[in-house]
Image (cartoon, coloured by chain):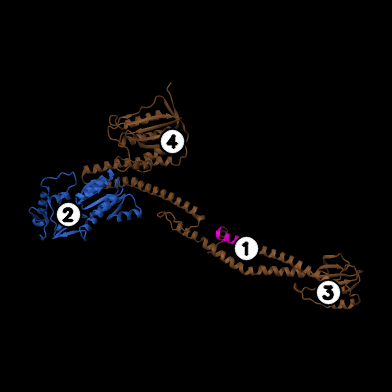
Amino acid sequence: MKILLVEDDELLGDGVRSGLMLAGFAVDWVRSGDLALRALADIPYDACVLDLGLPGKDGLAVLRELRRRSNPVPVLVLTARDTREDKVAGLDNGADDYLTKPFELEELLARLRALIRRACGLVSPVIEHAGLALDPVTRQVSRCGEPVALSGREYALLLDFMTHPRHIRTRSQLEESLYAWGEEVGSNTVEVYIHHLRKKLGQDVIRTLRGRGYQLGDSAP
Amino acid sequence: MTWLGKGERRGSLRWRLLAAVCIAVLLIWLLTGALSYHMARHEAEELLDGSLAQTGHLLLALLEGSDDEFAGLGGRLASVRAADNIYEPPLEFQVDQGDGAVIARSLDAPELPILGVLGYSDIIRHDESWRVLNLASEDGRFRVQVSQPSGLRDRAALEVAGQTVLPLMFIVPLLFLFIYLSIRRGLLPLDRLASEVAARTPDNLAPLSGREVPTEARPLVNSINRLFARVSRTLDHERRFTADAAHELRTPLAALKVQSQVALRSTDAPMREKALRQIAGGVDRAARLLEQLLRLARLDPVQQLDNPGPVDLAAVIHEALAAARAACAEADRPIAAPLPRGKAMVQGDAELLGMALRNLLDNALRYSAPGDAIRIGLDARDGEIAVAVRDSGPGVSAEVLDKLGERFFRAPGARAEGSGLGLAIVKRIAELHGARLVLGNHPDGGFVARIEGLKGQLIAPG
């Protein structure tokens, strides 16, 4: 799951990025509206956390521009302004949710999970597929009711597959989802994590489509 | 029209107009009555005096040459009765033979001595007032006295005056109604204006249209519209201030909160340590912000300096320079201070002036790149001293320049940490010294902040 964080304040941006990373998100952090629009045009983020009080092109302008380009990415707006007019303006300009500073990290994470769930068309908070169950809140994975312990990256990779069932995910898509900018990506890391997932959850949990990419297996183990 | 209390009625234009018009109409009415009474009375007097004279002369003519049958004539004359109105006025008479002996008289004639003065006279006899005419024949053999009760004239005059005034009795209420309705109609645009004003809220301060407003009220509408414009500008300013302040105050809090939660959640020691360091830095930043807020809060209510004294501005600049150089390596940001020799004595508060200079230097250091030169200049002219701090950064756009110095305003894109209060503090200090803070871009590049108009002069060393 990859999030774009748009925040000009160093301290807050650093904190939110660390918090999101702790929760298993890959986070790209930009500090201005123009950079945010460029990043959103290039990379299919799962969600965007946008501060409205940006210098230069402010958050509302970014939102309007984003929606004008018909970019459907779920946007959670962070703002210091808490009047009704401000909230209405934020939502009416294309925000999907709204948090007023200061906020609880827990709430930010829960709202992001809900936004992503809705964007994937999922109803239940626990994602289930072919005997596998993944709970994004507790980050627990079970297979046929048996809990399975996964590392952070393994979990993130499985989450990507389970929120995109039936999609064929290319290696570069998976890398983008797993890693933020500037993180070292090994030449065969995705293969390594897929290998780990198959070992822990069964060989057919992920299918390899030669030359095209990977897909979530659809038969129960 | 709604029913108004007594006090409100006194203040109501409508009531005042109505009352004034009513009183005027009533006065005119009364005056018309009095005038027509007066004129009718005069006319009746002339008319009835004429009839008296005619009757008197007629009597005299009858008496001439009728010496032998006085008794018969007297009796016949006395039998003439008249009605009691102006068209057939009653007539009383007495006739004598010039010696005071009455030879004929009408029944109700007042018993007056017939030997009175010739001509008209008004006489009161037995509580009754009479108009009397005494005439004598040319040869003096007969004297005639004709008389009429004066009351008749008054009645006649009243009647005429009444006929003039009474129809007005019916017209006046109609007139009042008409006046009332037209005042009401005339003031209707004011009612509409009032409801238009009442509909305005702080969110909707659009100018009033004032199209149907009477000319007399147009200056009021224009003034209200100007007021709306001013209030609207103030509100915009307040809103921006609130938004900027909320952002500047809440963002550090949000950052501290998130960082502390990261520290609590993280099991990774270096990550936790980093979060804790960030928190410490964030608290410092919040403390600085609070400090500046408090400074402004202390300066705000002050109308004038407590005890301004002579301050050597050059010395203040040197102190501020020393502090700046201590905070930032000389090689990193060379600061040039080509100050004139001698003392620059100004009237003011050394501590506040020092704070202003430190803030300006701090800004220059913060918003310029390493290696950029900073320059402090001081010049004196016409009993005024100016001090300027110039950096060699890119300067600021005209749009930003306009808002710099507003509280919590920070130039868009400013990466350096800051509260947006520094220049506001300097501005306030300058104001307290009767000086101004002038911000601008130097023609040779760089941003210049200049405190102008400090009262004082250079004193050459010696």
Estimate how packed mark 4 is, as few (under 14), some (14 to 19) or many (20 or more) residues with alpha carbons within 10 Å.
some
The picture's colour for chain B is brown
Mark 4 and mark 3 on one chain: yes
Estimate how packed mark 3 is, as few (under 14), some (14 to 19) or many (20 or more) residues with alpha carbons within 10 Å.
few
Comes first in the chain, label 4 or label 3: 3
The residue at 45%/37% (across/down) is B432
Residue where numbered disc 3 is placed? B108
Q: What amino acid is labelled 3 in the image?
A: Asp
Q: Nearer the viewer, mark 4 or mark 3?
A: 3
Comes first in the chain, label 4 or label 1: 1
Q: What amino acid is labelled 2 in the image?
A: Leu
Q: Is mark 3 on a helix, strand or loop?
A: loop
- C-alpha distance separating marks 3 and 1: 46 Å
- C-alpha distance separating marks 4 and 3: 108 Å
Residue where numbered disc 4 is placed? B435
- C-alpha distance separating marks 4 and 1: 65 Å
The residue at 19%/54% (across/down) is A139
Residue where numbered disc 2 is placed? A159
Span highlighted in magenta in the image: B11-28
Estimate how packed mark 1 is, as few (under 14), some (14 to 19) or many (20 or more) residues with alpha carbons within 10 Å.
some
Q: Is residue A159 above or below residue B134?
A: above
Q: What element carries label 4?
A: loop
Q: What element carries label 2?
A: helix
Comes first in the chain, label 3 or label 1: 1
